[in-house]
Amino acid sequence: MNTPFDEKPRRPGLFASLRASFLTGLIVIAPVGLTIWLIWSVIGWIDSVVLPLVPYDFQPEEYIGINLRGIGVIIFLLFTIIVGWLAKGLLGRSLIRVAENVVQNVPVVRSIYSGVKQIAETVFAQSERSFEKACLFEYPRKGIWAIGFISTTAKGEVADRATTSGDLVSVFVPTTPNPTSGFLLFFPREDIMELEMSVEDAAKLVISAGLVYPNPKDPSRPEA
């Protein structure tokens, strides 16, 4: 109960209000601005790499008088589509096999090409499987829980040599705040706990260092 002697709460000053408004605006503007800046920078970098390879007579700047950002990206996309279309044909596959045989005979280039090809096939191949589920498990010791992504069930020599009573599951353990780096660990299926949250929500949780949690499901809404 307030008494006449209680001090009234002091209203925030003008500087405090301006600071709060500035921080709120910064939270709204920063993600949008950084996204636009990143896309703009990537487009400019692709243009700087592609346009010098195009003869000057075929560049749009020769005809319109200004350098339009993004022309290099369009040229790169068209060139990649044409190369992919040719590679699907019999002649394209034959040329690729000949070129790969030549590369395999060069010691240093062979190692670089094999590594880059394996990475490209892993990242861009359409048949490549994505992560199945997000999961929790005790790591690096009992009582400490970590979040990971279930990849596949272990097969081959890894599954044969590991002594487990059930299936062995390969789990990718991402690092914060960069989830593209991490560790590949193998766990018995009974030692991992599958989560209901999606892989995307789990990735947001990792990137934000535990600050962004997925919204809880509405209990009144029936499950699909």
Image: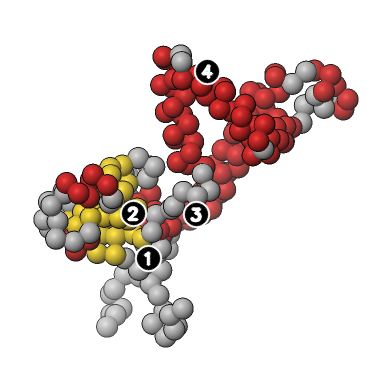
Real-space Cα separation, disc 2 to disc 3, in angstroms: 43 Å
Q: How many marks?
A: 4
Q: Residue at x 53, y 48 (%)?
A: 126
**Residue type pointed to by label 2:** Thr
Q: Residue at x 46, y 14 (%)?
A: 106
Q: Secondary structure at mark 1?
A: loop
The answer to whether mark 4 and mark 1 are in CB contact below 8 A is: no
Q: Earlier in the sequence, mark 4 or mark 3?
A: 3
**Residue type pointed to by label 1:** Met
**Horizontal and vertical percent position of residue 200:** 43, 57
Residue at image mark 4? 102
**Residue type pointed to by label 3:** Thr
Q: Secondary structure at mark 3?
A: helix
**Horizontal and vertical percent position of residue 216:** 38, 72
> Which callout, 4 or 2, points to the residue nearer the camera?
4
Residue at image mark 3? 24
Real-space Cα separation, disc 4 to disc 3, in angstroms: 59 Å
Q: Quadrant of residue 91?
A: top right
Q: Earlier in the sequence, mark 1 or mark 3?
A: 3
> Which callout, 2 or 1, points to the residue nearer the camera?
2
Residue at image mark 2? 152
Real-space Cα separation, disc 2 to disc 1, in angstroms: 18 Å
The answer to whether mark 4 and mark 3 are in CB contact below 8 A is: no
Residue at image mark 1? 197
Q: Earlier in the sequence, mark 2 or mark 3?
A: 3
Q: Earlier in the sequence, mark 4 or mark 1?
A: 4
**Residue type pointed to by label 4:** Val
